[in-house]
Image: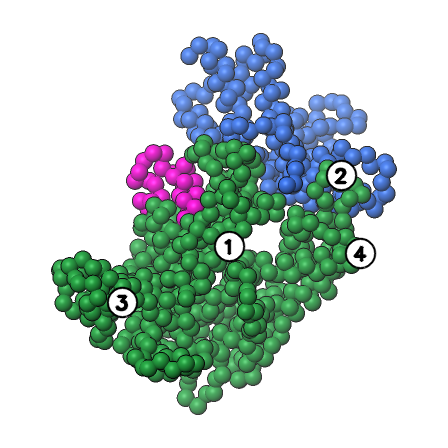
Chain colours: A blue, B green
């Protein structure tokens, strides 16, 4: 395989692994079956040499898909596109119910979200050195090599599983909601 | 692989298992938005025909699809109702329409190629088959769904014709190896599979198990007797209820109408889209209010269709009292044990539509079922019973997820039983209200292979043809009709019966017979001719048709035939007319069930 072909294949795989659970499982099985797993799977080394355009294009697809879902089920874009300042709290509250109910349903249906930290907010937590900085962040008087002792201020959220609708031929990710014309 | 399919009025699901493995539910890829596909465990039983301006509706396995089954089809019911087929299963059991005629959606515009109720069901099954094949077959024919053993569930109340049409839809979808199973029985199989060996401690010889299945569109009752056979428990289904088009959708609609009337009193009129949104919102509100006793009200906000949300969203509240009044009192009222559903006289000119139950009270339908089936089991001597006494209940269907509603049924039944000196019924624990039917279908298929327990029952009705007396016509007096029993109650699958009585058929002419079913006359044997029967004992079904082709015979000749009835291994009733003097070996004429009435 040429470098260019490998590069594009790697990117294609990246997004399928991210958004297609069945593909990810198969890819993972193939990878586990290899005698010596490649030292680095994601992101491919070549990524650093190139412009970041493919990244944003792919991420944008996923983001737009989620946005379209939130709009369809919970009128998310409608809500944010209106100026709240000119409406009463009662009006905002009523609209917020539509958004909360619908977006909540869409989110629960497509993303499995769990708290990053098992302890409740306000609890004391012992943090070992070598913690995952993506999933935990130290704040306040941060110094030393740990272990650290602190109070949980926010439990954090982790998207455990994401399953977005799969775009088919002719799908326009930028169409968050089509204009509707009643005949 | 062993496969179970729950072809529901509002949702369908497919379960599968290998012998010795737990039953799993297939994730069904379906169009959820224009050109976006997502896999969901339930496939809404809706069919949408988009206008050509919408272009193709690609699926992972078919880029050129022009119609939509599933989630998006259901959603479009609110914005393009005339292009959406819903409740195909109810149409399938509608006796006064031609169920093979392309008539759905009812008021579709001209550019829509309408489909029959059979074809809509076929499309749902086909979609499930395609989803299954995409996941398991990968081009290997032996792994395709069509090559698997499939158990397809039907309401216990489906008559011979509706069963036949369901099988026809399955065949059209390429699924030849199907067997039918009654849904309440499937729920029992699922319950047995889920309880493991514990179920043997929960049921005892002498128990009468009442299955109450209230789904999205229909209410279905069955009674199953528990017996003792050489120390083992034996189950047999002894009675099934009538086909009642009444379910959770009616309840959501009732609440939506209540709130819609309040909006109207405030001068706000909801459009069809808003009303559909309101119905969805009412379903959610109902589930919350019934599920959480600490909630007294549940707010409902209905957006309008424009992009303006603030200031244009309607607000209402559904209170516990509303739910109590509308659902609990309206659909599950306390009634006496001799209460019977109120039947409303239909107007002379009724619009073509589904024969929805005219009495919304589930408890009254239950009282009627038990009363009608009082004689389903032998009554101990000296005991006086006005209705069939269940000793335990298994609940099924989405509506029964509500503990409050289950409690209403238990309380009603407890009261009726107490009045006749019987103990209260036990509720069987561990029901799976949504997926039990699909899971139970696969569990039943597994049971058929192994030594697993099987519920016996045979046909849930006895069937009769109407024989008109040859008498001089008298104006105003309808000719007397007698009913000839052609298939007795409880006829087992794989058995057949030859009728002793001879009938004469005219060559080249189609002869139509009136056709009846009875879910209560258990003693009639094939060949019995009924002179009269009491009100409600026999139910008239769609007529049947017999024709003798001209081949080898003179047109107008009368051919003496005998009727022959088969209950096929699939679970359908097949009728044949066998000539006494055949022109060819094994000559027989097919009898067509489910001809349109009148």
Q: Residues within 10 Å of mark 3 (few under 14, many from 20)?
A: many
Indicate the secondary structure of the residue bearing disc 4: loop
Residue drawn at (44%, 51%), measured in percent from left and top? B102
Pointer 3 and pointer 2 on the same chain:
yes
Nearer the N terminus, badge 1 or badge 4? 1
User: Can you give x and y, in whole percent of width and height, for residue B360 in the image?
Assistant: 59, 68
Indicate the secondary structure of the residue bearing disc 2: loop
Picture quadrant where residue B228 is located:
bottom left
- Residue B133 part of the magenta-drawn span: yes
Pointer 2 and pointer 1 on the same chain:
yes
Q: Give the CA distance from mark 3 to mark 2.
A: 64 Å
Q: Chain of mark 2?
A: B
Q: Give the CA distance from mark 1 to mark 4.
A: 33 Å
Disc 4 marks which residue?
A: B266
Give me the disc on residue B308. Answer: 2
Q: Using the rendered image of the protein, determine whether residue B188 is visible from the camera's viewpoint.
A: no
Disc 3 marks which residue?
A: B565
User: Can you give x and y, in whole percent of width and height, for residue B90 in the image?
Assistant: 48, 58
| B149 displayed left or right of B8 | left
User: Can you give x and y, in whole percent of width and height, for residue B107 in the image?
Assistant: 54, 51
User: Can you give x and y, in whole percent of width and height, for residue B55 in the image?
Assistant: 52, 32
Q: Residues within 10 Å of mark 1 (few under 14, many from 20)?
A: many
| B326 displayed left or right of B440 | right
Q: Give the CA distance from mark 2 to mark 1.
A: 34 Å
| A88 displayed left or right of B561 | right
Give me the disc on residue B87. Answer: 1
Pointer 4 and pointer 3 on the same chain:
yes
Q: Using the rendered image of the protein, determine whether residue A98 is visible from the camera's viewpoint.
A: yes
Is B540 situated above or below A121?
A: below
Q: Which residues are magenta?
A: B122-150
- Residue B28 part of the magenta-drawn span: no
Pointer 2 and pointer 4 on the same chain:
yes
């Amino acid at each position: 395989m040429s470098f260019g072909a490998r590069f594009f294949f790697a990117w294609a795989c990246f997004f399928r692994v991210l958004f297609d659970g069945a593909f990810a499982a198969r890819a993972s099985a193939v990878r586990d079956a290899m005698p010596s797993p490649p030292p680095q799977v994601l992101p491919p080394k070549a990524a650093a040499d190139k412009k970041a355009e493919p990244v944003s294009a792919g991420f944008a697809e996923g983001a737009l898909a989620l946005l379209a879902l939130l709009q369809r089920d919970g009128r998310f874009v409608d809500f944010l596109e209106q100026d709240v300042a000119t409406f009463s709290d009662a009006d905002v509250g009523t609209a917020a119910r539509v958004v909360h109910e619908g977006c909540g349903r869409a989110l629960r249906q497509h993303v499995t979200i769990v708290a990053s930290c098992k302890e409740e907010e306000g609890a004391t937590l012992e943090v070992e050195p070598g913690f995952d900085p993506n999933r935990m962040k130290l704040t306040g008087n941060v110094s030393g090599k740990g272990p650290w002792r602190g109070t949980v201020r926010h439990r954090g959220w982790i998207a455990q599983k994401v399953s977005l609708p799969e775009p088919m031929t002719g799908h326009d990710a930028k169409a968050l909601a089509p204009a509707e014309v009643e005949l | 692989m062993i496969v179970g399919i729950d072809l529901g009025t509002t949702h369908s699901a497919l379960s599968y298992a290998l012998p010795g493995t737990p039953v799993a539910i297939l994730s069904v890829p379906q169009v959820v938005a224009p050109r976006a596909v997502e896999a969901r465990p339930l496939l809404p039983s809706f069919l949408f025909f988009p206008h050509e301006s919408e272009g193709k509706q690609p699926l992972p396995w078919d880029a050129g699809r022009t119609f939509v089954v599933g989630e998006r089809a259901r959603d479009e019911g609110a914005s393009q109702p005339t292009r959406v087929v819903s409740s195909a299963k109810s149409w399938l059991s509608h006796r006064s329409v031609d169920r093979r005629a392309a008539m759905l959606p009812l008021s579709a515009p001209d550019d829509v190629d309408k489909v029959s109720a059979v074809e809509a069901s076929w499309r749902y099954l086909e979609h499930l088959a395609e989803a299954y094949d995409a996941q398991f077959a990968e081009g290997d024919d032996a792994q395709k769904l069509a090559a698997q053993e499939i158990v397809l569930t039907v309401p216990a109340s489906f008559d011979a014709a509706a069963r036949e049409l369901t099988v026809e839809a399955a065949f059209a979808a390429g699924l030849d190896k199907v067997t039918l199973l009654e849904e309440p029985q499937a729920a029992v199989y699922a319950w047995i599979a889920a309880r493991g060996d514990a179920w043997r401690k929960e049921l005892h010889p002498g128990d009468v198990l009442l299955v109450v299945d209230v789904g999205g569109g229909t209410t279905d009752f069955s009674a199953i007797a528990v017996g003792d056979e050489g120390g083992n428990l034996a189950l047999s289904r002894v009675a099934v209820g009538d086909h009642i088009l009444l379910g959770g959708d009616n309840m959501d609609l009732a609440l939506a109408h209540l709130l819609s009337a309040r909006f109207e009193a405030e001068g706000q009129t909801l459009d069809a889209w808003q009303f559909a949104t309101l119905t969805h919102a009412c379903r959610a509100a109902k589930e919350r209010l019934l599920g959480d006793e600490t909630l007294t009200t549940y707010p409902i906000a209905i957006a309008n269709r424009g992009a303006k949300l603030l200031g244009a969203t309607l607000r209402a509240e559904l209170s516990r009292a509303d739910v109590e009044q509308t659902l609990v009192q309206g659909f599950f009222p306390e009634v006496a044990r001799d209460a019977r559903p109120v039947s409303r006289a239909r107007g002379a000119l009724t619009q073509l539509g589904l024969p929805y139950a005219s009495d919304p009270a589930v408890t009254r339908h239950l009282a009627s079922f038990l009363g009608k089936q009082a004689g389903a089991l032998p009554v101990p001597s000296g005991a006086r019973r006005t209705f069939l006494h269940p000793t335990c209940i298994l609940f099924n269907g989405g509506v029964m997820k509500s503990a409050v509603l289950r409690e209403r049924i238990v309380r009603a039944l407890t009261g009726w039983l107490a009045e006749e000196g019987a103990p209260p019924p036990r509720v069987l624990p561990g029901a799976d209200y949504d997926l039990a039917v699909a899971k139970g279908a696969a569990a039943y298929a597994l049971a058929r292979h192994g030594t697993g327990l099987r519920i016996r029952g045979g046909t849930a009705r006895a069937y009769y043809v109407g024989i008109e007396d040859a008498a001089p016509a008298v104006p105003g007096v309808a000719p007397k009709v007698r009913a000839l029993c052609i298939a007795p109650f409880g006829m087992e699958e794989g058995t057949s019966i030859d009728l002793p009585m001879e009938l004469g058929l005219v060559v080249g002419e189609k002869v139509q017979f009136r056709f009846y079913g009875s879910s209560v006359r258990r003693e009639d044997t094939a060949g019995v001719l009924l002179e009269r029967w009491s009100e409600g004992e026999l139910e008239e079904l769609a007529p049947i048709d017999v024709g003798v082709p001209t081949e080898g015979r003179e047109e107008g000749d009368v051919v003496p035939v005998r009727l022959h009835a088969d209950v096929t291994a699939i679970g359908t009733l097949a009728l044949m007319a066998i000539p006494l003097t055949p022109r060819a070996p094994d000559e027989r004429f097919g009898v067509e069930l489910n001809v349109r009435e009148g």
